[in-house]
C-alpha cells in the first residue's frame, strides 16, 4: 500500500474531498487489510479442494521502521497469526508469522493520513508519502491419504478487503472479495518413477559362461543359476502400481517369450540356448505383457503435519530381477554346432495405472 503526498501544507488538520467521500483529521488512518478464512483441519492448517492436502499461510512485513502500537505513524497489525490466542501482534520487519487460527486471520496495513511539523511556531499539516508492504507464503501440508491429483484450488481461503476511507469516516468502500490463488497455478501431480538418471540407462549384464554339453549330462531343458539384474528407479515420491513391460529387441523373438541370443560377430541367431527373465522367482513373459511390481519410492509418513514432499525430490530404489540360461537343444548357428560369445537385448518400459 502506498500513499503519496502532494507537498501542500496547511495550518488546519482537516482534509475533505468529494472524491470517494474522503474526510481526514489529525487522528485518521488509512487502512488496507487482508483476511484468511477457511475450514481448519489441524492447528493453522486449512483445507483445500483436494482431500488429504492442506495449506498453511505465513505473513511477513517487508517494511522497516514500523510502530508497535495504534498511536504510531505506521504499523502492520496481525490477528490470528503467530499463536491461536487471538491476541493482536504488531509485525516486526523480516519476521515470518504463521497462520494459527482458530478463526479468521487478519493483516492490517495502517498509516496516518496526516502528519505535522512545526515551523516558526506554526504547526503545519501534510499528507505523508509512505509505503507499506507484506509478503505471503504458503506451504502444502499432507493431512491424510491423497487419492486425487490435479489443480488445487484455494479460492475459498484467501479474501481481501480494503477501506480506502480513513478511520472514523462514515464512508467506507468494500469491494468484492479478491481471490489471490484461483485457477490452476498449483497442480498436484501423481508421483512417478523412471530409470535413474544417475546410472547408465543401457544395462549390461554379464551372464557368465555356459557349457554347451550341459544338456547331454542333465537332459533338456537345462537351467543355469540365477544372475541378478538390478534396475535402479528414480522416484519423486511414492508411486503406486508400477508395471513394467519387457520386449525382445532381437530380429527373431522366441515363441516361448524368453530372450533370444545371437552371435557377437554378425548378429546371427543362436538356436538351442536362450535367457529367461524372472522376478521374485517367477517367469516374466518378454513379449510386451505388463508385470506388476507394486509400489516404489518414498513419501511422507506422518498425516499430521509433514510437508507433502517431506523426502528428497528423488529417491533411488533398486529393483532386482533375475536372468538365467535355458538350454533346450544342442547349441547351433545356421544348423552348425556353435561355441563362442552370445548376446541378447531386451527393451524395458514402465507403465502406470
Image: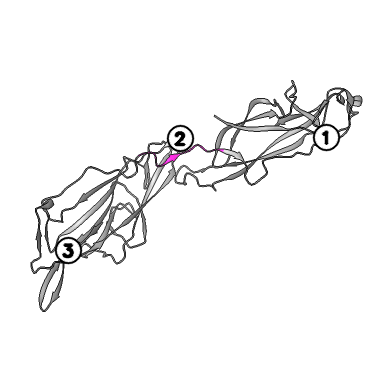
On the image, which quarter does residue 205 sit in? top right
Residue 107 location (% of width, % of height):
28, 53
Q: Residue, x 85% and y 36% (percent of image)?
A: 209
Kind of element beneath mark 1: loop
SS for callout 3 = loop
Looking at the picture, how far across and down is residue 240, in whole percent? 55, 34
10 Å crowding of disc 1: few (<14), some (14-19), many (20+): few
Question: What residue did someone put label 3 on?
Answer: 6
* Left or right of 314 on screen, residue 307: left
Residue 232 rendering spot, x and y as whole percentages: 65, 41
Q: Nearer the viewer, mark 3 or mark 1?
A: 1
Q: Main secondary structure of the magenta part?
A: loop
Q: Residues within 10 Å of mark 2 (few under 14, many from 20)?
A: few
**Quadrant in which the N terminus appears:** bottom left
Of residues 299 and 184, the one drawn nearer to the viewer in this rendering: 184
Specify start and end residues of the magenta stretch as a single range. 183-192
Q: Which mark is residue 149?
A: 2
Nearer-the-camera pick, 179 or 17? 17
Q: Where is residue 44 shown, x and y percent of the image?
A: 36, 48
Mark closer to the chain start, 3 or 1: 3
Residue at mark 3 to residue at mark 2: CA–CA distance: 52 Å
Residue 92 part of the magenta segment: no
Residue at image position (80%, 36%) is: 207
Does the stretch in magenta take in 185?
A: yes
- Residue 265 tag number: 1
Amino acid at each position: 500500500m502506498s500513499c503519496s503526498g502532494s507537498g501542500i501544507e496547511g495550518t488546519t488538520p482537516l482534509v475533505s474531498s468529494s472524491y470517494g467521500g474522503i474526510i481526514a483529521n489529525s487522528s485518521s488512518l488509512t487502512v488496507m487489510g487482508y483476511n484468511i478464512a477457511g475450514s481448519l483441519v489441524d492447528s493453522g492448517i486449512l483445507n483445500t479442494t483436494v482431500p488429504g492436502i492442506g495449506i498453511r499461510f505465513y505473513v511477513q512485513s517487508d517494511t522497516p521502521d514500523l510502530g508497535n502500537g495504534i498511536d504510531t505513524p505506521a504499523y502492520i497489525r496481525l490477528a490470528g497469526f503467530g499463536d491461536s490466542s487471538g491476541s493482536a501482534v504488531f509485525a516486526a520487519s523480516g519476521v515470518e508469522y504463521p497462520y494459527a487460527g482458530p478463526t479468521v486471520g487478519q493483516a492490517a496495513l495502517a498509516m496516518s493520513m496526516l502528519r505535522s511539523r512545526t515551523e516558526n511556531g506554526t504547526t503545519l499539516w501534510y499528507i505523508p508519502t509512505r509505503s507499506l508492504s507484506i509478503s505471503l507464503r504458503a506451504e502444502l501440508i499432507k493431512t491424510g491419504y491423497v487419492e486425487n491429483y490435479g489443480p488445487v484450488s484455494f479460492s475459498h481461503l484467501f479474501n481481501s478487503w480494503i477501506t480506502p476511507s480513513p478511520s472514523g469516516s462514515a464512508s467506507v468502500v468494500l469491494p468484492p472479495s479478491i481471490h489471490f490463488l484461483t485457477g490452476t497455478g498449483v497442480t498436484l501431480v501423481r508421483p512417478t518413477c523412471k530409470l535413474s538418471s544417475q546410472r547408465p540407462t543401457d544395462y549390461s549384464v554379464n551372464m557368465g559362461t555356459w557349457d554347451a554339453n550341459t544338456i547331454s549330462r542333465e537332459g533338456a531343458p537345462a537351467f543355469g543359476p540365477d544372475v541378478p539384474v538390478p534396475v535402479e528407479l528414480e522416484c519423486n515420491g511414492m508411486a503406486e502400481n508400477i508395471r513394467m513391460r519387457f520386449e525382445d529387441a532381437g530380429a527373431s523373438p522366441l515363441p516361448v517369450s524368453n530372450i533370444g541370443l545371437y552371435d557377437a560377430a554378425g548378429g546371427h541367431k543362436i538356436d538351442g540356448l536362450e535367457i529367461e527373465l524372472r522376478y521374485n522367482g517367477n517367469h516374466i513373459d518378454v513379449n510386451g505383457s505388463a508385470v506388476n511390481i507394486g509400489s516404489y519410492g518414498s513419501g511422507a509418513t506422518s498425516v499430521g503435519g509433514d510437508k507433502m514432499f517431506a523426502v528428497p525430490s528423488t529417491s533411488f530404489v533398486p529393483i532386482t530381477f533375475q536372468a538365467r540360461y535355458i538350454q533346450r537343444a544342442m547349441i547351433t548357428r545356421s544348423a552348425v554346432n556353435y561355441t563362442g560369445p552370445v548376446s541378447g537385448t531386451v527393451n524395458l518400459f514402465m507403465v502406470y495405472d
